[in-house]
Image: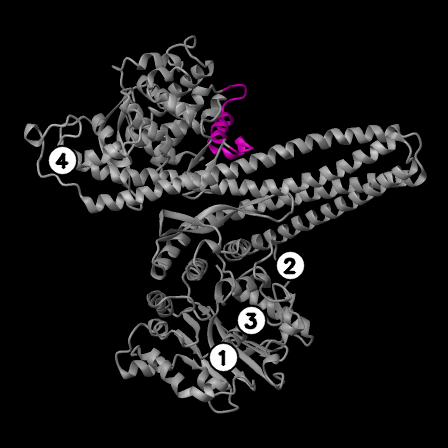
């Protein structure tokens, strides 16, 4: 992701430390918001953006892509990534993202969490070269050919999640089979692809998606995109059944 | 649903330590609902009396021959273990006549049935057993009588085995000093959860499958050790057969190295399983610390944000975010620099109403609501918490990195050793095949080794199938226990907040049952407490009793037991027995805990039997519900005391100062000092 270097004045310092991780997180945010933009669910509230990031992570094996984090700390209210949020805030300051309606939500133990409506700043001159480098425009321009696939996956997933009513999108992650796995209580890390040695056994979302195949006539196959749409519909039904 | 006994009546006869108020009458006591205080100074037999209650149920049996161990083993025995003679003679050894004619009789109610158990104190022999005043014939033979009694106990407790009765007695009902409780001893917790919550058949199947896994593991390891010995002999035989042969020397050297590597590989397998657990714990703590740091910093931001909105209502959100982050965390989001100096400057500007972005004085500004004052105290508190949270995050990050790197280094070493073992095994086979001549004893050893290796593979396969079977049973049990988790956590929270000042919660984690010495572990639901502490932001998980103070350890365990009782019995009444709960508590804590115990004792038909050595009168007052308002209250309270100053054989301290001790007790009863 060396292209980001040109766009970030602090990149040199960042790259000397945990720079790679920072760049990965920033690229991820931009890709997610670009996908949201394409299917018309942008801007996204912080909670929905984190839910989208989580579902993209846990469902990545459906597209045979490696998990980004492969783990999540299960907490009240749904997935939230402090590292990702830090980079979201930085991208706002860098002018690449836009934020509106900032508010603070109360959290347990007198804590708080920022909330706002996030979207890509389409007027930023920096945005287009970044999107190109991340494979959001065409596979030829992508610095890493895999990013093109990642982007296509995000767009399909965003499209699938667009079928979930707006106010239920944040909740959809808590209904996800892996996140809702009762073996893990709050305050525990669910590992579905980070150190896990058996992804198919630990990633219940993947197992659920794979089960859809069983309901098809013999010989019929589901595409990756169809599986995501079915899973989104499954999440929607679980939300409404609560 | 399990049943716990409600003790109703106790009689101790002809036992020298408890002659009674009128010499020779012994102790006769009816436990009425509420508190029963066993009061007395050291040496009067408080522990003996509590132990007598316990042993009336257990008889001359326990989980080990020594009684309850400091920590439970990973598996529980199939049957209760007979106590060692000196433990059986616990009561005999305390009196001159060896308790020759001493006897204890205890009545206990289980639902609608009342049981009466009588035991001889010299050797814990069962004298009689009656249900609803009707004597039950348990047979003539002593062993058969005990076995039949134990079966009856399983029925009345409604658990699958007498071992489970023992677990419930020790880890739920009897809270004795110096024993790790149900929460802190991970094996005890696992067994107690199994005994309390799993359906009886499943509970006994799990316990049996655990024993099978351990036995298969032990068998596989023994055979492996035999194979190792045969290999050594074979190596020696080969070396002596052709000591001059270059191949033989080479083979001997290779074999020595191979043996060392096999040993190292086994050691590394054990290590890796330990380090894996440690790195997972460290990761969980780091992830929690990151989240808490963010929430603590955002709390500062939110206060600043509210102020900024009031001060500059038209400021753009993005600009607000830059100023906010700089104000709250001292970090510039634009360039990443440390802005703590600038932060002080900006705060001073804000205090004077100067715009932090353009530096405009208040009179030059438009759209500004004057009179802004930063809510200093709230901000300071939030900032202090945020600073602690940052430190905590950094400390947990370092631990996480360290444990991760330890794991990776062991894993690297293991991979290298395994590759080397594979190569060396091939080489030794080749060298072995090239040896010119094989004597009879070598052939014999080779055959023997081959057979032993075959047995080893069989034993390993047995272990794998036992492990698979256990895994499936544990999976069935997991859901049952997890369903109780929320209720347990809520009840724990309710109990613990009455007892300790820190904010504590019960958290369910995925624990590991270590039944084999190899790498196999079994995931089981487990509970830990998480708690706030001085100089730490938020709550952190307490994995071991060393992570909390002594009093917190006991009180957290007490809250856990109370939660277990409430949920496992469906809120039915029961008896809880505690030794000196005031030990290690300060004055205020004693009052808090005393009131919490009073609440338990006052609920429904509960009985709370507590010993006290009169060192802390405040605790006694609190357990009775506070100051006695009138003389009738004192008289009522006296009816709830087994006063060992009156009924136990007096020691020198009592003979010298009985009146003073009685005054201390009276003052504890009234609450007037």
Asked whether the beta carbons under mark 1 and mark 4 sit within 8 Å of each other, the answer is: no
Residue A53 on the magenta span: no
Measured in 3D between alpha carbons, the distance from the residue under mark 4 to the one under mark 2, in whole angstroms, is 71 Å
Q: Position of residue A118 (x, y in %)?
A: 27, 25
Q: Residue at x 41, y 43 (%)?
A: A187
Chain letter for mark 4: B
Q: Residues within 10 Å of mark 1 (few under 14, many from 20)?
A: many
Q: Residue at x 38, y 69 (%)?
A: B601
Measured in 3D between alpha carbons, the distance from the residue under mark 1 to the one under mark 3, in whole angstroms, is 13 Å
Q: Quadrant of residue B60?
A: bottom right
Same chain for the residues at labels 2 and 1, yes or no? Answer: yes
Same chain for the residues at labels 4 and 3, yes or no? Answer: yes
Same chain for the residues at labels 2 and 3, yes or no? Answer: yes
Q: Horizontal placement of B667 versus B303: left or right?
A: right
The residue to which callout 3 is attached is B57
Q: Residue at x 49, y 87 (%)?
A: B20
Q: Which residues are magenta?
A: A195-221
Measured in 3D between alpha carbons, the distance from the residue under mark 2 to the one under mark 1, in whole angstroms, is 31 Å
Measured in 3D between alpha carbons, the distance from the residue under mark 2 to the one under mark 3, in whole angstroms, is 18 Å
Q: Residues within 10 Å of mark 4 (few under 14, many from 20)?
A: some
């Amino acid at each position: 992701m060396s292209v980001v270097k040109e766009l970030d004045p602090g990149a040199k310092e960042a790259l000397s430390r945990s720079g790679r991780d920072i760049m990965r997180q920033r690229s991820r945010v931009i890709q997610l918001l670009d996908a949201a933009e394409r299917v018309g669910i942008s801007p996204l509230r912080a909670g929905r953006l984190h839910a989208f990031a989580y579902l993209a992570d846990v469902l990545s094996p459906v597209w045979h892509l490696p998990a980004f984090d492969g783990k999540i700390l299960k907490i009240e209210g749904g997935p939230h990534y402090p590292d990702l949020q830090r980079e979201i805030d930085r991208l706002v300051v860098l002018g690449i993202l836009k934020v509106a309606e900032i508010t603070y939500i109360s959290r347990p133990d007198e804590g708080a969490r920022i909330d706002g409506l996030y979207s890509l700043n389409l007027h930023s001159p920096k945005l287009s070269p970044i999107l190109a480098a991340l494979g959001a425009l065409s596979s030829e321009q992508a610095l890493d050919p895999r990013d093109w696939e990642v982007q296509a996956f995000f767009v399909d997933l965003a499209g699938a999640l667009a079928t979930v009513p707006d106010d239920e999108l944040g909740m959809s992650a808590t209904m996800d089979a892996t996140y809702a796995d009762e073996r893990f209580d709050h305050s525990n890390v669910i590992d579905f692809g980070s150190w896990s040695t058996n992804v198919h056994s630990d990633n219940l979302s993947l197992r659920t998606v794979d089960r859809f195949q069983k309901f098809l006539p013999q010989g019929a196959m589901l595409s990756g995109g169809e599986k995501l749409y079915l899973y989104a519909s499954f999440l929607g039904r679980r939300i409404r059944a609560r | 649903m399990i049943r716990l006994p409600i003790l109703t009546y106790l009689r101790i006869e002809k036992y020298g330590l408890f002659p009674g108020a009128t010499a020779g009458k012994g102790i006769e006591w009816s436990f009425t609902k509420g508190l029963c205080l066993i009061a007395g100074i050291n040496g009067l037999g408080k522990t003996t009396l509590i132990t007598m209650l316990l042993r009336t149920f257990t008889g001359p049996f326990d989980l080990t021959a020594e009684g309850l161990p400091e920590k439970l083993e990973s598996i529980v025995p199939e049957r209760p273990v007979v106590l060692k003679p000196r433990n059986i003679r616990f009561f005999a050894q305390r009196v001159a006549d060896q308790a020759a004619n001493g006897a204890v009789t205890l009545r206990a109610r289980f639902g609608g049935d009342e049981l009466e158990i009588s035991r001889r104190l010299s050797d814990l022999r069962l004298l009689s057993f009656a249900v609803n005043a009707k004597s039950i014939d348990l047979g003539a033979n002593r062993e058969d009588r005990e076995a039949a009694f134990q079966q009856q106990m399983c029925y009345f407790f409604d658990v699958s085995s007498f071992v489970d009765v023992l677990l419930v007695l020790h880890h739920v009902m009897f809270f004795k000093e110096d024993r790790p409780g149900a929460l802190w001893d991970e094996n005890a917790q696992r067994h107690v959860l199994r005994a309390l919550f799993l359906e009886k058949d499943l509970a006994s199947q799990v316990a049996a499958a655990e024993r099978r896994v351990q036995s298969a593991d032990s068998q596989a390891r023994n055979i492996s050790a035999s194979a190792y010995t045969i290999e050594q002999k074979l190596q020696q035989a080969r070396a002596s057969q052709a000591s001059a042969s270059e191949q033989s020397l080479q083979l001997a050297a290779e074999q020595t190295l191979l043996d060392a590597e096999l040993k190292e590989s086994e050691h590394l397998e054990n290590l890796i399983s330990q380090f894996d657990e440690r790195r997972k714990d460290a990761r969980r703590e780091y992830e929690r610390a990151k989240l808490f740091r963010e929430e603590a910093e955002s709390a500062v931001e939110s206060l600043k944000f509210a102020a900024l909105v009031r001060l500059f209502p038209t400021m753009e959100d993005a600009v607000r975010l830059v100023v906010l982050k700089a104000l709250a965390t001292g970090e510039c989001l634009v360039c990443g620099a440390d802005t703590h100096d600038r932060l002080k400057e900006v705060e001073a500007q804000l205090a004077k109403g100067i715009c932090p972005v353009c530096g405009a004085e208040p009179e030059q500004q438009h759209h500004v609501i004057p009179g802004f004052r930063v809510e200093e105290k709230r901000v300071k508190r939030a900032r202090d918490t945020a600073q602690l949270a940052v430190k905590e995050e950094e400390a947990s990050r370092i631990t996480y990195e360290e444990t991760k790197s330890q794991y990776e280094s062991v894993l690297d070493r293991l991979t290298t050793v395994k590759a080397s073992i594979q190569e060396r095994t091939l080489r030794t086979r080749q060298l072995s095949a090239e040896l010119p001549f094989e004597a009879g004893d070598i052939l014999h050893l080779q055959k023997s080794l081959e057979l032993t290796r075959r047995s080893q593979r069989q034993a390993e396969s047995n272990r794998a199938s036992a492990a698979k079977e256990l895994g499936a049973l544990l999976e069935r049990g997991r859901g049952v226990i997890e369903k109780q988790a929320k209720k347990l956590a809520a009840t724990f929270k309710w109990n613990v907040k009455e007892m300790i000042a820190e904010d504590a919660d019960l958290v369910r984690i995925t624990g590991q049952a270590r039944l084999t010495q190899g790498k196999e572990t079994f995931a089981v639901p487990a509970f830990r407490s998480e708690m706030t502490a001085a100089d730490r932001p938020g709550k952190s998980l307490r994995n071991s009793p060393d992570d909390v103070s002594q009093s917190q350890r006991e009180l957290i365990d007490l809250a856990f037991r109370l939660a277990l009782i409430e949920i496992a019995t469906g809120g039915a009444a029961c008896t809880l027995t505690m030794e000196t709960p005031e030990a290690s508590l300060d004055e205020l804590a004693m009052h808090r805990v005393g009131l919490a115990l009073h609440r338990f004792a006052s609920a429904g038909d509960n009985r709370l039997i507590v010993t006290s050595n009169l060192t802390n009168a405040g605790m006694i007052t609190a357990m009775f519900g506070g100051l006695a308002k009138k003389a009738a209250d004192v008289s009522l309270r006296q009816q709830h005391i087994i006063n060992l100053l009156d009924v136990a054989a007096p020691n020198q301290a009592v003979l010298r100062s009985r009146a003073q001790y009685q005054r201390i007790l009276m003052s504890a009863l009234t609450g007037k000092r």
